[in-house]
Image (cartoon, helix red, strand yellow):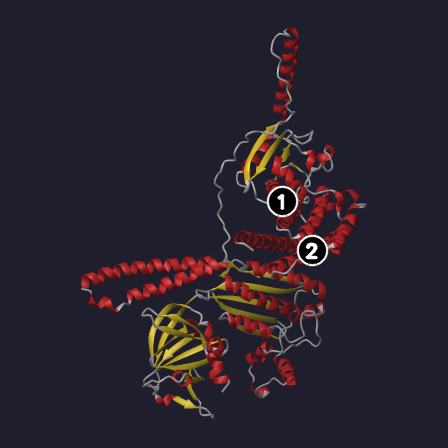
Amino acid sequence: MDNGMESMLDTYLFETNSLLDRLDEMLVADEKLGDLSVDDVNEIFRIMHTIKGSSAMMEFGSLASISHHIEDLFFYIRENGIDSLDPAHKKELFNLMFRSEDYLRGQVEKVENGEPVDTDMDSFAAEINSFLKKISGTGEEQTSAPPAPAKEEEGRPADPSPSALPSSLPDDKKAVCFLHVFLEEGVGMENLRAFMIVNALKECGLELRYYPENMEMNSETCAAIIEDGFYVAFEDMESANKASDVLQTQNHILSYELVDVAAMEAQAQAEAKAAEEAAAAQKQAPESAPAPVQEKPPAPKPAPPKQAPNAPVKQNLISVNLMKLNSLMDIVGEIVITESMVTSSPELDQLNRDAYDNFMKSARQLRKLTDDLQDIAMSLRMVPISGVFQKMNRIVRDMKQKLGKDVRLTLVGEDTEVDKTIVDSIQDPIMHMVRNAVDHGIEENVQDRLNAGKNAQGEVILAASHTSSEVIISITDDGAGMDPDKLLAKARDKGILTKPESEYTKKEALGLVMLPGFSTNQAVTEFSGRGVGMDVVKKNVEAVGGVVALSSELGQGTTFTMKIPLTLAIMDGMKVTVGDSIFTIPIANIRQSFKVTADEIIRDENGNEMVERMDSFYPVIRLHQFYNIETAITDPADGILMWVEASDRSFCLFVDELIGEQQVVVKPLPAFLNCFELKNYGITGCTILGDGNISIILDILSLHAAALENV
């Protein structure tokens, strides 16, 4: 696939997915009301019309066919009014539309994955047509009527062939004027290009008819369009003038001309009258030269047609490939590193005071500009989390129907912005937790809720907020809550307890639901019971540097909380030294740094070092011992302890010296190091310091697992 087609495919996928997301939001909201508004009916018709045209242009026949059948359905509903459907039909319509959306999404996913789309869609198309016949009585006229033409077009020929369209105007008795449009030479798929232009005019609310009528479905019309262009008919001059303005913004148009039917008829009559007068004069003066024979057709082909002006199109939004944003972020990171190298260069010490002061003044201005550039580059990658949140409405809607539970989903903080990469990573964890809240959290029996003084309708609250460095997402249900004793009993039966039950705290008992293979459901259902889900949530969230916390009160409900960094590209870190090595610890993981004496270090029954802090004892990890680094600082009094935590793990790191805080650019480790699985040894990446040295970035959670849990 060449770059041009690949770009067209990316645009098609982006636009189609956006339209399907909009359709999903609309259907979920309207189903709650039990009805479709007139505006929503028109909007769904336009969505299907657009998907049909763009899919046909990209030659995805199944998508074009199904959207065309749905368009037929909503053409009937639009013409006859949504009130013509009884409540049972409306309910069936919603179910049919949700299945149609799922089908279209499935086909789009196949396109995204490079798989061939389905070619046999007869059964699903028959289902749509069957519903149309049901709501329309016989349905014979409606199932065959195309959605684009209006009712007034009954006087036109039903199916003119391309050969019936010479350079003369189409036979449209009600047309006041025509736009005669010519496409650029060699654009390819001329019939579909023309149809997309017509579609753009329709989306502006213009009433029109177009010729050839069946251009979108008949590739044979390409020859006629190449030879003689295509026509758009209007019943008033004002619409034609508006359409002329729209045509200035469209691609692949070579030229167009506005043809006034009344003016052409007057011109034809004048020419006929002139011909009659010339013939009469010829009879009276036979010796004079014969008059030329008038052989003009009533509507000659315009020559030369007016060239469409290249008016600028105002556009405030553009879509950008994520790979380009990643490249931009990499370059900005290199600029930050290079700027740090320049300002910390040892050659600066050789400058005199005045020269050094002038240099540092310019360096401060450069630092300000690089900080602004960094903020802007990061903001380009930030997208609202509303797209993920809105999809949960559909999840809850489907589960309500299949589980027979009355649940409402409340969304809070939809406008919270997160890095695009992280949004893609947390969609599945959020989906799992919402499904868990509806399936496990909300009570099966409504009477149980009423007896507990709750509303009969359960509620799941999906909320998002952000601090300066992280996004906090919570999923709360007002269901039965979790019983720690039952969780411990279930874990005992599965043999996954690591210590006596009496030693488990409430927090640790609740944390058991995050273990692989753990499920509180007694039977396997479509949504749960297989022991897969919450462990995947924890793994996926931790993969993007986040943590998952769980709290629950028996009889009151459960809350899952995810804390996720705003971006993975740049972070605030604390630089520390161990021997000749420099490590970077994320600031978000540091609680405190302090010095101790040898007497304050105690040992547990296994001989491991521990230190007391705020009435609790925490294990000590000596980084020089763990990584086998030679250092002269081994006495606790000579080094420094960093109290760190991640998720529910908390411990202290013994390091030689604390250098200071610095904003660092996170770089992935080279690919040839992947075979060593350094992630399992507490190393998550690296960064380049101002002097050119490399600093290892520590992953506190995996460091705890490697040094303390797997000893």
Give the residue at mark 1.
Answer: 192
For mark 2, give the secondary structure.
Answer: helix
Q: Position of residue 113 (x, y in %)?
A: 60, 61
Q: Nearer the viewer, mark 1 or mark 2?
A: 1
Q: Position of residue 76 (x, y in %)?
A: 73, 44
In the picture, measured across the screen, residue 440 lies left or right of residue 644, that is: right
Q: Which mark is residue 277?
A: none
Mark 1 and mark 2 lie on one chain; the one further toward the N terminus is: 2
Position of the N terminus by quadrant: bottom right
Which residue is drawn at the image coordinates 62% and 18% (left, top)?
271
Residue 381 showing in the rendered view: no
The residue nearer to you, when weighing 477 against 303, is 303
Q: Amino acid at mark 1?
A: Leu
For mark 1, give the secondary structure.
Answer: helix
Q: How many numbered discs?
A: 2
Residue 160 showing in the rendered view: yes
Q: Quadrant of residue 517?
A: bottom right
Q: Is residue 200 above or below residue 369?
A: above
Q: Position of residue 618 (x, y in %)?
A: 44, 84
Which residue is drawn at the image coordinates 34% and 57% (left, top)?
369
Q: Which mark is residue 100?
A: 2
The residue nearer to you, when weighing 518 against 209, is 209
Q: Is residue 221 above or below residue 624?
A: above
